[in-house]
Amino acid sequence: PNGPPAGQVPPARLGTQMPNERPSSPIATAEMLAVGAELLAGETRDTNSGDIAGELTQLGVEVARMSQLPDDLEVVTEAVRDALGRVDLVVTTGGLGPTPDDLTRESIAAAVGQTPTVDPELEAWLRDLWAARGLPFSHAHLKQAWLIPSAEAMANPNGTAPGWWVEHEDKLVVALPGSPRELWPMWRNLVLPRLRTRGLGLDRAVRTLHLVGIGESALVDVVGTDLLEAENPRMATYARADFVDVRVSAVATPEQTAQEIVAQAVADLSPRVDPYVFAIDDEDWLDALGPLVGDRRLALAEVGTGGYLGLLLGQAPFVALSEVRPAAPDAVALAAAVRQRAAADIALAVIGHERGDDMQVEIGLDIEGRTETVTRTAFRGGDTGRRRSANTAIAELWRRLRA
């Protein structure tokens, strides 16, 4: 069965409203445990953990770890027990079904040293689900009616597996089904409201700087170990597909808010990385180029880049023309020709050639009649190289307009 019959109300024990509570300290740290052999076999991808972690991070909770675990009682029990020793909140997904390999309830019970028993109200509710459909009730389904003394059941409106809300000492375990269709209504409607009431997150702030024209290893030297090894604020570098990020995060202190700490850290960092920073947080190339182009018009042309230049910039309001050509004599001549054809103020042209394992990128610029050509190398060939060639050309235009 897929959820209770229309009009059937779950028992009060299967909570749909949680009591008000506020502990002395908020939930500051969390871990995600995704349970299921299919995750480790690559048959199913665990998108739940990352999405929940993203929401918790936005709410000021530091997600310390995300793990994928097999359907093994000893492994999952140890993982839950270890996580409870490290963080305030443990969120498990998967393993709440009725089959012998659904072991999350048993694992949580073992981790907190309690024995599960069948709750009569939950059992009656489950039996009614099957009876309403004229189906026989299997004894195996009784494990979905299990509770331990420290657990409350959470209603699952889209399935038959209740979740668990477990208070253990000063720690919390939330057990959710693995199916996104069942998980997300429970997370949004039951878990998050109760977490907020309980006390969720610290005053945290994050700012991410997007850098171009420098690799991660070189960036580490530019930023310096004095900043990268600091605890609060914390700085970290990340290599993305086409650029590098510096993530600056902080937790409030009695003297300063998290936003103030991050703002000061970014100000301290700016003299070292400003030549490379083209965007911040959710900004992209359109945000970076828009103020530099101003009320002028930009024309684009590309050869050998798979149309990536147009994909990245073609929809910008300041782009007068974007075209892909099969061939061109050279990039600067192509830039001059396309600027004249579009009656634009600025033109950017790029010609990509595969050279061994990488791409040779010929970039032509025509800025109000002043032409220039440069040649760069984009690492990797194929589709990755073509996309990086387009990004390399845009970065060159950004540098010239910024100068």
Image (tube, rainbow, N blue to C red):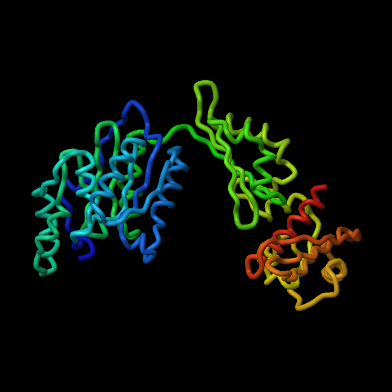
Q: Residue at x 66, y 64 (%)?
A: 380
Q: Is residue 390 above or below residue 292?
A: below
Between 108 and 13, which is closer to the camera in this rendering?
108
Q: How many marks?
A: 0
Q: Is residue 155 visible?
A: no
Q: Quadrant of residue 394?
A: bottom right
From the top left corner, tell me how far across and down residue 122 is, in percent.
13, 51
Q: Quadrant of residue 158?
A: bottom left
From the top left corner, tell me how far across and down residue 119 is, in percent.
11, 48
Q: Residue at x 75, y 71 (%)?
A: 353
240 vs 26, left or right, is right
Q: Is residue 256 above or below residue 33?
A: above
Q: Is residue 364 visible?
A: yes
Q: Is residue 282 above or below residue 348?
A: above
273 vs 362, left or right, is left
Q: Please identify the residue farthest to the bottom as the structure is shown.
A: 326
From the top left corner, tell me how far across and down residue 377 is, in percent.
74, 61
Q: Residue at x 58, y 37 (%)?
A: 235
From the top left corner, tell me how far across and down residue 387 is, in percent.
66, 64
